[in-house]
Amino acid sequence: MKSDIRVCSVWETEHERPVYSLGDTCPECGSPTANTAPAPFSPEDPYGEYRRALKRSDRE
């Protein structure tokens, strides 16, 4: 699920603290914003196979 809240992509160098926005650009400096939500999973997840197997066994 994509988050509606976005953060200024250059806040570490341009601002004292994170600047959040609902738009595609930062309201203070005009730079692009980035999604604040982390990815739901990593393709390189070393334990994904075991987690999926556990879910399958719970369904049975």
Image (spheres, grey):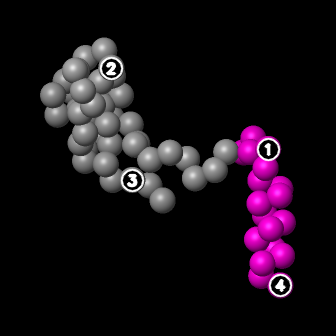
| Residue under pointer 4 | 60
Residue 53 versus residue 40 in the image, above or below: below
Please name the amino acid that badge 1 sits on.
Pro
* Residue annotated with mark 2: 12
Q: Is residue 46 magenta?
A: yes
The x, y position of residue 43, in whole percent, is: 72, 45
x and y, in percent, of residue 6 in the image: 32, 42
Question: Quick check: is 25 in the magenta stretch?
Answer: no
Left or right of residue 43, residue 21 in this image: left
Say which label, 1 or 4, has the lower sequence index.
Answer: 1
* Neighbours of disc 2 within 10 Å: few (<14), some (14-19), many (20+): few
Extent of the magenta region: 43-60
Tag 1 or tag 2, which sits nearer the N-term? 2
Q: Earlier in the sequence, mark 4 or mark 2?
A: 2
Quarter of the figure with residue 19:
top left
Task: Tell me the SS state at disc 2.
Answer: helix
Please name the residue that numbered disc 1 is placed on.
46
Residue type at the position of mark 4 = Glu
Marks 3 and 4 sit apart, C-alpha to C-alpha, by 33 Å
Q: Nearer the viewer, mark 3 or mark 1?
A: 1
Name the image quarter holding the C terminus: bottom right
